[in-house]
Amino acid sequence: MSDEELVVKDANGNQLKDGDNVTLIKDLKVKGSGGVTLKRGTVIKNIRLTYNEDEIECNHEKVKGLVLRTEFIKKA
């Protein structure tokens, strides 16, 4: 990372931090998971920030090692 701190924001513009909980704002089909769809309103707990301000990493009971785009989540 550079000298300035990476700022990651959700779809509503709220700043996200490691360990935050987020909610999906759209149904998402997960590629490579055998047809799993995460429904709108699903709460994802304990997110991890990446070096990309448009993506976060997380785990869900159906999918491990999930990467989500910040445009599809809001802070819970």
Image (cartoon, rainbow, N blue to C red):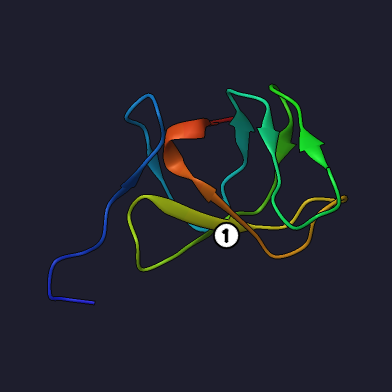
Q: Quadrant of residue 38?
A: top right
- Image quadrant holding the N terminus, namely bottom left
Q: Quadrant of residue 47?
A: bottom right
- Image quadrant holding the C terminus, namely top right
Q: Using residue 37 as the reference point, say whether residue 5 is left or right of it.
A: left
Q: Using residue 14 as the reference point, say whether residue 45 is left or right of it.
A: right
Question: From what the image shows, is residue 17 above or below residue 4?
Answer: above
Please tell me which residue lies in front, 14 or 25.
Answer: 25
Residue 14: x and y in percent read 36, 32
Please tell me which residue lies in front, 55 or 36.
Answer: 36
Badge count? 1
Q: Using residue 46 as the reference point, say whether residue 16 is left or right of it.
A: left
Name, please, the residue furthest toward the left: 3
Q: Which residue is mark 1?
A: 57
Residue at 74 percent across and 30 percent down: it is 42
Residue 15: x and y in percent read 35, 40
Residue at 43 percent across and 65 percent down: it is 50
Please tell me which residue lies in front, 61 or 22.
Answer: 61
Residue at 32 percent across and 54 percent down: it is 53
Residue 65: x and y in percent read 69, 65
Residue 3: x and y in percent read 12, 75
**Mark 1 secondary-structure assignment:** strand
- Near mark 1 (Cα within 10 A), the count class, few <14, some 14-19 or many ≥20, is some
Q: Quadrant of residue 64?
A: bottom right
Inspect the image, locate mark 1, and give the three-letter code of the amino acid beneath it.
Answer: Glu
Q: Using residue 26 as the reference point, say whether residue 10 is left or right of it.
A: left
